[in-house]
Image (spheres, coloured by chain):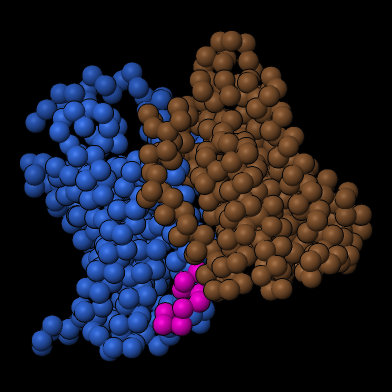
Chain colours: A blue, B brown
Amino acid sequence: MNRVLKPAAVLLAAILVFLLPGWLGGVHGAFAVIAIMAVAAYGLDIVVSDLGEVSLAHTVFFAAGAYATGLLATRLGFGSWATLFGAIAVGTLIALALGLVTLSLREFVFSLVTYAATVVAAAIAHNWNVLGGSDGVSGIPTLDLSLGPVRLAATNDAELWPYAFALLLIALYAIRQFRRSRLGAMAMMVHLNPRLATMSGIDVRRVRLAVFVLSAPFSAAAGWLYAYQRAYIGPDLFETYFLVLMLTAVVLVGRRRLFGPLIGTALVVGQERFLSFGGDVNAIILGGALVTALALLPGGLDGLFRRLVTRPTTPAPVPEARPLAQP
Amino acid sequence: MNLVQQLINGIVLGHAYALIAVGWTVLLGVARLVNFGHGQIYMLAAFVTWWAVAGLGLPYPVAILVAMAAGVVIGLIMQAAMLRLTFTQDLVSIMIVTLGFGHMMRGIAGLVFGGQPQVLETPLSYIDFEVAGAWVTAQDMAVIIVSIIAFALLHFVLERGSLGRTARMVAEDPKLAQLAGIDVRKVYFSVFAFEGAAVALASALVAPRTPILTSIGFEEVIVTFVVVVLGGIGSVAGSYVAGLGLGIFTALFGGFVSPAYATTAAFGVLIVVLVLRPSGLALGAGGGRR
C-alpha cells in the first residue's frame, strides 16, 4: 500500500509545484531562481550537514559554473550541453584542487581557507581580462538543449522554468541517493565520530575529499543554468549575498532534511521577490534569519514546528501511532 | 628611493595589519572563538568614525573613542546572541552566526550611512615627514605607535598577569574553570567586547587611508587570518611579527609586481605555509596546540 501511495503523493506534489507559478500569475522567473539557488545550496548542504564542515567556497563553484558557461557560449559558441559539461568539469576541478589543499584542515581553519579562496577568486574575476574583468560577460545566448529533431529550448523565464524544475528534481534525487549510499553513511560517521571511522577502516581524508568534490557539480550546474537565466555573468556572483543565501537555506529549516534547502531558498528568495523592503533591509532580514535559525532556534524552523505541534499532544498520540505504523 | 618608500609603506601596512588582527588573536587564543563578522565591524567602525567627525563635528581622538564604544556594543550583542552556542562549543554554528551578523551589519551600514563612498580627512593626515627620502604622514606614525602600544600591553596583560591565566583556563576547559569559581560568562563577554573595541580602534586609525565603503572589510578578514595563522594561533608576539612581515611582503609585491593581486599573493603565502606545516594549524577536535 505504502509503496504505491508514497510515489503517487510525491508525483502529485511535484506536478502541483510545477504548475504553481502559472496559477500565481506567471511568476516563472522567481520560481526558476528559487530552483536554481536551491540546487546550488544542495551542494553546500552535503558538506555542511553530512560532513559537518562549513565550506565558504561554494559560491566559487557556483560562479565557476556560470563563468564557464558564459565564456564557452559567447567566445567559442558552445551549445548548452557542452557548456553544462564544461561548467561541471571546471567546478569539479576547482573543488579537487581546493579539497587537496585543505585535506588536513578542520573547522574554522578549513572555513577560513575556503573563504580566502572565495575572496581571491573574486579578485581574479575583477582583474583578469580573459574572464571579462569587472564588466563581466554579457550576451549569453538562450538555453538550447535540443537533441536531433526534439526541440528543447527556452527563450524566456516561463520556458526556462521546466528546465530549472528538472534540474531541481535531479538534484533532489541525487541528494537522496547520496544519503542512502555507502559514501553518505561514511561521511556521517566521519562527521560524528572520526575516531570510530578510522578504527572501522575508513580513510577519513579520502571520504572528506570525495564528499567535497562531489558537492561541487551541484553548485556548478546551478551556475550553468543561472548564466542562461540572467544572460549575463560578472564578478557580482562572488558577493557574500550568494554565500549567505546558501548558508541560510541550509540551516534555516534544519539540517539533513531533504527538502530543507529548497524550503529555505523559497522563503528567502520569495521574501526578496514578493515582499521586498529594498536591498539593505533585505540584507538585514537575511542575516537576521541566519542568526535566528542557529542562535535562537536549535533545530531550525523544523525543530520549532515540531515543538509547537507535539507539545500539547505528546501524551495522547504516542500509543496510537505505533500500531498504525506497523503495516 | 622607490624601494625605501615601499619598505616604509610595508612597515606602516604591517603595523596596520597587526592592529587589525589583534582582536582575533585574543578571541582565538583566549576563548577559542572566531568571528567572521570581523571585517564588517571594521567597516561599520570606519563609518562611525567618519560620522562622528563629519556629522557631529567631534575632534578625531574623541571620534576614535566613539567608534570603540560602538565596537564594544556590537561585540556584546553578538556574544549575547551566541552565548548558548559558546557554552556548547559549537564552533561550526558560531562561524555561520558571525557571518550572518556580518551580512546584517552591511545592510545596516547601507541603510544608515548610504551607498556613497566617504573620505575621512584626519588632522594627522596633513602632516608629512621625510624619512630617508621617503614620505610618511603623521597618520601612518599613529598607526605604528598605537599598534606597538597595543601589542606591548597585551603581551604584559595576557602572558604575564593573572587576567591572562584566568582567560587561558577558560579557553582550555570552560567547565573546569566554572567549577574553580571563574565567571565564564564574564570572560566570554569581555573577550568579545575587546574584539569589537580592538577592530574599531584599528579601523579608526587605518580606514582614513582609503575611501570608506560598505563593501570594505573582506580583505581585512583574509589579512587577519593570514596574520593569526602565520604568527601561531593565539601568540601575541607571533601575530605582531607576522603582521609586519605580511605588510612588507604586500607592499613590495604591490609596488613591484601587481597591486591588484596583492591579496591573492598573501593567500598564496598562506597556502604554502599550510602545505608545509599543516599539522600545527589543525585546531579543534584533538588537533593543534590543545
Q: Which of A156 and A175 is in front in this view?
A: A175
Q: Which of B6 and A120 is in front in this view?
A: B6
Q: Which residue is drawn at 15% across and 33% down?
A: A201
Task: Please give left or right for residue A13 compared with residue B43 in the image.
Answer: left
Foreground of the two, B246 or B17: B246
Q: Is residue B194 above or below residue A261?
A: above
Q: Is residue B208 above or below residue B165?
A: below
Q: How many labels does the image show?
A: 0
Occupied quadrant, residue B79: top right
Give the main secondary structure, helix, strand or loop, of the magenta stretch. helix
Query: Is A258 located above or below residue B90 in the figure?
Result: below
Image coordinates for residue B263, horizontal then vertical, percent? 54, 63
Q: What stretch is highlighted in magenta?
A: A123-132
The residue depicted at 61 percent of the width and 46 percent of the height is B241
Residue B145 x/y as whole percent: 79, 48
- Quadrant position of residue A237: bottom left
Q: Which residue is drawn at 52% across and 38% down?
A: B233
